[in-house]
Amino acid sequence: MGLAGCGGGGRSTLFGTDTHPADYPTVQAFRYFGDLVERRSGGRLRVKIFPSGQLGAERDTLEITSFGGLDFNRVNLAPLNSIEPLTTIFSLPFLFDSEAHLRRVLDGEPGERVLRSLAPHDMIGLCFYDSGARSFYNTRGPIERPADMHGMKIRVQNSDLYVAMIQGLGAAATPMDLSEVYQGLVQGVIDGAENNWPSYESGRHYEVAPYYSLTRHVMAPEVLLMSKVSWDNLNSADREIVMESARESVPYMRRLWDARVAAAQEALVADGVRVNEVDPRPFRRRMHPVWESFVTTDVQNDIMRAVLAMGDGNA
Ligand code: GTR
């Protein structure tokens, strides 16, 4: 796949992947982006997206993207943590005060810096998409304090930061791909996981893990990437089309996202999911050593300070 193999009469088909199904906001925004690219290039560039994780787990498709085997990829920031340490900053537990804080950061200088940090890894960061706040859900009962998680096996994304986060809360971490979570919960390989409302709903995890506890501990965003190999094959006018189309898909995605979070929450509460509010402070306190061991370089500290300075208290 990729530009090199698909040319013909000046037309190229570019291929992309997303772990979510076709109706999920990330995929819809990705489509919107693809349509803009196609229209603005007069049909010379077409974008074909493989949704539903058909092409594999996020970590694996990232590797394929960096080699140029895939042109575009929409992933969460978490699987990039082991590739680029700056992505760890936006993935830190309890970093953002609110969705508004997150959006200011993504739209500002810290966001630009993190997107740019991916180029040395052969990926061009085109834009961020929202992923809301992640909370814990499990098969056993409501989580109100960290002690309630003791002895639980909690699934995390493939990120050492999140393994450390779970261990810091006194539970056992099991990294696995999203596609394995439902069966993992059914079979008792894991007792719980954590995600935003739309993913909790879309993966039907609520059917087997009906306790959703609003810790809102992580707000790591999604990112739309282009393989640097494919990017280097574009002329500068086409690069601009790609970059502008990606940026223009962001407000579209945010509208879809906000609506989807509200709809998912409403549907699941009506379905009988047991939701409880959580005092985040005891959870946040346990994250201090985790921050310390994952934020080690000057550049990381610099970006982290910039993010904190943009918090709601200073807005
Ligand atoms: C979702 C995110 C996916 C994936 C998933 C997971 O919120 O949109 O890209 O990372 O979480 O937990 O694996």
Image (cartoon, grey):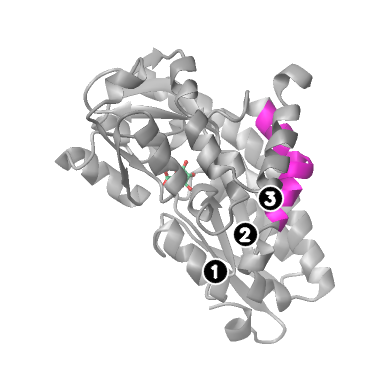
Residue annotated with mark 1: 65
Q: Amino acid at mark 3?
A: Val
Q: Which residue lies at the image location 43% right of the left edge and 48% below the top edge? A: 160
Q: Amino acid at mark 2?
A: Leu
Q: Are marks 2 and 3 in contact (CB under 8 Å)?
A: no
Q: Which mark is residue 114?
A: 3
Q: Is residue 170 magenta?
A: no
Count of numbered labels shown in the rendering: 3
Q: CA distance from mark 2 to mark 3?
A: 12 Å
Left or right: residue 23 compared with residue 8: left
**Mark with earlier residue (2, 1):** 1
Q: Amino acid at mark 1?
A: Thr
Is 256 above or below relative to 76?
Answer: above
Query: Ligand 1: which quarter?
Result: top left
Q: Which residue lies at the image location 28% right of the left edge and 28% below the top edge? A: 138
Q: Nearer the viewer, mark 3 or mark 1?
A: 3
Counting other residues with Cα less than 10 Å from the Cα at mark 2, is it few (<14), some (14-19), or many (20 or more)?
Answer: many
Query: Which residue extends farthest right?
Result: 237
Q: Which residues are magenta?
A: 101-116
Return the x and y of residue 101 as percentages of the image width and height. Answer: 69, 28
Q: Nearer the viewer, mark 2 or mark 3?
A: 3
Q: Is residue 104 magenta?
A: yes
Residue annotated with mark 2: 225
Is 120 above or below relative to 213?
Answer: below
Depth check, front residue: 103 or 271 = 103
Counting other residues with Cα less than 10 Å from the Cα at mark 1, is it few (<14), some (14-19), or many (20 or more)?
Answer: many
